[in-house]
Image: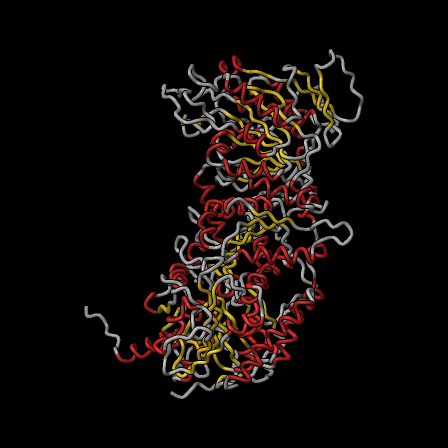
Amino acid sequence: MTYLPKPKLHHPKLPTNELGFTRRDYEGSISTLCAGCGHDSISAAIVHACFELSLPPHRIAKLSGIGCSSKTPTYFLGNSHGFNSVHGRMPSVLTGANLANRDLIYLGVSGDGDSASIGLGQFAHSIRRGVNMVYIVENNGVYGLTKGQFSATADKGARNKRGLANLDEPIDLIGMALQLGATYIGRGFSGDKAQLVPLIKGALTHKGAAFIDCISPCVAFNNHVGSTKSFDYVREHNAAVNFLDVIEGRDEIVVDHAPGTVEVVRQHDGSLLKLRKIARDYDPTDRIAAMNFLQQHQARGEIVTGLLYVDPDADDLHGYLDTAEKPFNQMTDAELCPGTTALEKLNAALR
Amino acid sequence: MRPLEAVNDFVVKFANVNGSGSASANQLFAKSILRMGVPATPRNIFPSNIQGLPTWYEVRVSEANHLGARGGTDLMVAMNPQTWDQDLKSIEPGGYLFYDSTRPLPPSKFRSDITVIGMPLTAICNAEYTDSRQRQLFKNIIYVGALSALLDIDPAVLETLIGEQFKAKEKLIDVNIHALHLGRDYALQNLACPIGLRVRKADAIGDRIFIEGNAAAGLGAVYGGATVCAWYPITPSTSLAEGFTRYCNRYRVDKETGKKRFAIVQAEDELASIGMVIGAAWNGARAFTATSGPGISLMQEFIGLAHFAEIPAVIFDVQRAGPSTGMPTRTQQCDVLTAAYASHGDTKHVLLFPEDPHECFEMSALAFDLADRLQTPVFVLLDLDIGMNERLCAPFRWDDNRRMDRGKVMTAEDLEAGRDFGRYLDVDGDGIPYRTYPGTHPTRGAFFTRGTSRDRYARYTEEGAAYQDNMERLLRKFDTAKTLVPRPIRRAAAEPTRLGAIYYGSSSAAMDEAVSLLAGQGIALDTLRVRGFPFHEDVRRFVSDHDQVFVVEQNRDAQLRTLLITEEEFDPAKLSRVLHYDGSPITARFIAGRIAETVSSLKIVPLRKAVP
């Protein structure tokens, strides 16, 4: 297999964003995943979200681990630096990258094997540190590249393609993210782009650890009857709590819905998260209520989707460490090296 | 048996109970000797424990500047009943035993060939203090006071040191000085002072400083421009990250805003530590981790990624005795091979071997330049002996004209000007390609970093030729490294000789002394101190200049010797093993003994040619 460049030609009337880029400028090379793979829809949603937010592509760093999902960063944002790191270890690499330059946007892409099995520890610790990032898990419940073994998010009793049932309890990454202190948590479905794009946009504008669990059926190994991560199953059990709109700038928004059906959350950067409520009693700023709600619905076999939790005033790792505003990777000798005078003084104190 | 007599040349060993507060009193003792102008080298021999287990503090006093461990004890300060028997046994014939005589011991508990000095320390403390913690803490200062009388240490020097130590807590000065004199006065009145071992004022220190290797390496990282430190606590490396933290807080906090020009993350494990280092370095910051052997084992996969994806990383490995958990508080040089070839696949890494805190500082700062220049992981191999013990060494030096060597980094201007950018393209023939930091240019210079194979323009490929091309370039790069790592240091014997010795790292002080011991026995030995890997061509020259070369190491399997044979294809018969690996620091007596033994056996048993 070789690198497949995508033709650069596009329709001359393709719309451009504030930076003059077309959607095509946010694409990568041609996907080598299976035709119909849910992951490709997520890549398309990322392209869409970055285009709509007019983000300069080169100011985004995309990092991943190993697996089908971790291959996807090649297929979007071709003008961004990418890093396909080690299986299950994207979170630590992203954390280090973020420390080096706080001015870029960090997009971590992972899968259920990468984050819930081999990388569960790194997933957990990057979340609890509050690394400013968008962490997307493309969750299909199986290992695709090694041909269909269950991953740690597969539901107990779910059947694989050969009909064998999964014996282990599933790991609920959303529940863990809530417990560990992620400050923006959403669950999407690769089959619902209209819901997913704003979820990603909200995460990109959020300061702090933003986590999105995106159910993304594996057409090759986990889309059959008996699977709980198939397109049909997810559509039938999808319980969306809200529908999100991300509004940039500080324009007043007009609420044109019945009272109590729309909630507006203003984030740190001034962007507004407009939430059209579907579950009337769901408050996405109440972490403990969100935990209860999710547990109750999960027990009923429902897959709760939407913006599940947000702390609009969240801080991040740089804030906790009180680091300088200037990125470390741009600091000069004068800013970093104390020089001979200090060293002489130190030598004297060591005699 | 005549009691030992020596001025400025003896070994004192303190046998204490861990957690009893003896460390600062013992350090005070060592420093007082240094302040009298006499070189003293302390070594902590401590258990993997916080409270209750035996711990020792050994001070070698040597006006002749022998800073290595000597072996044997001339004066034992036996403060731990648990280890009485072994402590008693370790005293040299004619040596001295100082002990707490509050509780009488039967004569069978002593030796007749040593001088026994009993002092009722507990009784003195109980009479003076009512608080139990005070009784314990001041007992230590009291014995230091008594030792000052027994060894003729200037009490004014001790008083000055106490004043310096408690500068911030002034009320503690007087009480400590009081305890010091309590011990000193008792000794002067009741014991035969001084004994045969004495400290006499000298001028043998010069401008040298006294510091731990780990602290020095942490300082070197500050001077080297490191901004990201990710680490996981592990003995004996912990104090390196703590040293970096301390110096960063002193030198890298903005005076106006209070903002920090550094980030230190205590990671969840060593995998995350090295992952963060690689992420930060990929993004253009200087980053490091500090660990020990078990941590290196955990980092293997990531080290291979950094090697193959060509990302700078600085790894301090403060070695301890392995394998497995091994002896976590004992020293060894046992990670040479694991570091040199860390990870799966064909990998080789740059290694640096500091000999003392001075070089820990220098090589620490240098490691960041090398890592950036070579775009690869660089290991600094310290060990517990130099890492966790204070050592007399040359003062730190810096040149204010020195600038960080960030290596081959393409700027936005380069890219804008249309310079061809191939991430794995060998433009200059030295095997080192150019890199870009993320976010440099809107449309040029972005590439995908991966551990899977790719072509010269960083495009994914599984083509054999492209893979091999890349692997061969990595070898060329490693050849370039040979010219950049610190050169070995060669020292010629006073007379021409066909015998040589190669050594490295913390064996240095013992080796220097062994050379003079051997010269006294008529064995002339040229030496070569290896300071880096890949080996500089001087190593080859040294081996070919000699008939027999001893490779002196602190591990069981002769790891550097293996590396020499593998990489340089030396004749194994030419390289003799001198191996010390019981967890204690190597001594001159050991090295000289082994070499003398081999030399005499070589002379007695003639080499027979195999009969065809």
Q: Name the residue at 56% across, 17% down.
A: A191
Q: Position of residue B94 (x, y in %)?
A: 40, 84
Task: Kindly tell me whether residue B429 is visible in this rendering.
Answer: no
Q: Locate the N terminus of chain B and report the quarter of the image it occupies.
A: bottom left
**B471 or A151, which lies in front?**
A151
Specify the farthest residue to the left: B612
The percent position of residue B117, horizontal first and vertical second, equals: 46, 80
User: In this rendering, is residue B566 above or below B550?
Assistant: above
In the displayed orientation, state which residue is furthest to the top: A258
Tell me the quadrant of the picture where the C terminus of chain B can be found.
bottom left
- On screen, residue B305 versus residue A16, left or right, reads left
Residue A278 horizontal/vertical position (percent)? 64, 14
Question: Please, is residue B130 above or below residue B494 in the view?
Answer: above
Q: Give whichever of B26, A221 is nearer the camera.
A: B26
Q: Residue furthest bottom?
A: B2
Q: Position of residue B539 (x, y in %)?
A: 45, 67
Q: Nearer the viewer, residue A76 or B243?
A: B243
Q: Quadrant of residue A93?
A: top right
The reply to whether residue A15 is in sight is yes
